[in-house]
Amino acid sequence: MPKIHSKEDVINMARWIKGSKIYYLQQFRPEKTIDPEFENIKPYKEEYLKGIIKEISPYFKICEVR
């Protein structure tokens, strides 16, 4: 989620769990959130998430955006 997790955060998390078989990076959807303020945050663009996947995919057998 933008403003909460950066690209570097996701890369670091992927490094911690590298060797896992599957990793899905899930797009943030600003609906029915715990904090109503989150509903005003725009999700990352698909291209941005695909760039992260490209960087972390060597750590996993399957690595995708969903």
Image (spheres, rainbow, N blue to C red):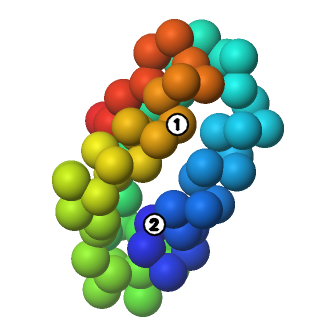
Return the mark for residue 1. Answer: 2
Amino acid carrying label 1: it is: Ile
In this picture, residue 16 sits left or right of residue 4: right
Q: Position of residue 29 (x, y in %)?
A: 30, 60
Q: Crowding at label 2, few (<14), some or many (≥20) Cα neighbours within 10 Å?
A: some
Question: Which residue does the numbered mark 1 point to in the structure image?
Answer: 56
Of labels 2 and 1, earlier in sequence is 2
> Which residue is rendered at x = 51% and y = 62% of the image?
7
Extreme residue toward the left, this view: 46
Vertically, is 56 above or below 3?
above
Q: Position of residue 13 (x, y in %)?
A: 69, 46
Q: Is residue 25 visible?
A: no
Q: Is residue 43 visible?
A: yes
> Which residue is rendered at x = 78% and y = 38% of the image?
16
Instruction: Report the Cα–Cα distance between label 2 and label 1.
Output: 17 Å
| Secondary structure at numbered mark 1 | helix
> Which residue is rendered at x = 21% and y = 53% of the image?
46
In this picture, residue 21 sits left or right of residue 28: right
Q: Crowding at label 1, few (<14), some or many (≥20) Cα neighbours within 10 Å?
A: many
In this picture, residue 25 sits left or right of residue 66: right
**Front in this rendered view, residue 35 or 48:** 48
